[in-house]
Structure formats: structure tokens, C-alpha cells
Amino acid sequence: MADKTFEQQMDDLDKIVNRLEQGDVPLEEALDQFKKGMKLSRELQQKLENAEHTLAHVVDNQGNEQPFETEDTDEEK
């Protein structure tokens, strides 16, 4: 099975959270779901950090990675 997208994983995590919030899950299953939710949370956090790193850098015409600079400079602060 192919890796799930970020959105699919978020949906899975949302379902786990909603199920656990209902409170009618047997203890053993709740613990299992909690572990799955924590694993998903870590994976999603890693994907976000990777995306942030990618978006924070651009590649110039020579193929060199450069920090992404916005027009918000220290002069405006």
C-alpha cells in the first residue's frame, strides 16, 4: 500500500481523536488507538517540518540553495 498523503493522515488522526473523545472505547482499544494517534502525530509533525524547510529555501539559477527572503525586512520592523 502506498504512503498516505498528509491530508489522509490528518483525517485518520481526526477519526482517532473523535473516537477517543466519545469515551465508549474499551481500555485496551483506547490505548492502541492512542498509540496509533501519537505515531501519526509524529509523522505529521515531521512532514510539516520538512515542508517548512523546503519552503524556507529556494534554488538560484546556478542550482545553489538560498534562504527564502520576503520583502519584510528589518527596516519595516
Image: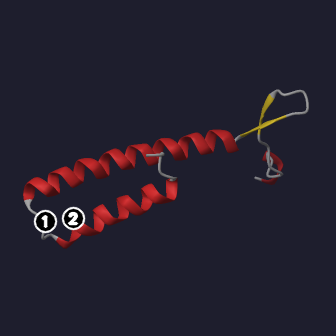
Residue type (three-letter) at the residue carrying disc 2 = Leu
| Place of residue 43 in the rendered image (x, y in percent of width and height, measured from the top left) | 42, 44
Name the residue rendered at 43%, 55% in the picture. Answer: 9
Neighbor class of circle 2 (other Cα within 10 Å; few <14, some 14-19, many 20+) is some
Rendered residue at 15%/69% (across/down) = 23
Q: Which residue is mark 1?
A: 25
Q: Is residue 28 above or below residue 53?
A: below
Location of residue 62 with respect to 53 vertically, above or below: above
Residue beneath the point at 50% across and 59% down: 7
- Which quadrant of the structure image shows residue 11? bottom left
Q: Position of residue 72 (x, y in %)?
A: 79, 52
Quarter residue 65 falls in: top right
Kind of residue at badge 1? Val
| Side of 31 where 51 appears, left or right | right
Name the residue at 9% across, 53% down: 28
Q: Position of residue 27 (x, y in %)?
A: 8, 57
The residue where tag 2 is placed is 20
Do labels 2 and 1 touch, CB within 8 Å?
A: yes
Density class for disc 1 (Cα within 10 Å; few <14, some 14-19, many ≥20) is few
Q: Nearer the viewer, residue 50 or 7?
A: 7
Q: Earlier in the sequence, mark 2 or mark 1?
A: 2
34 horizontally vs 44: left or right: left
* 20 displayed left or right of 65: left
At mark 2, the secondary structure is: helix
Per the image, label 1 sits on a secondary structure element best described as loop
Horizontal and vertical percent for residue 73? 81, 47
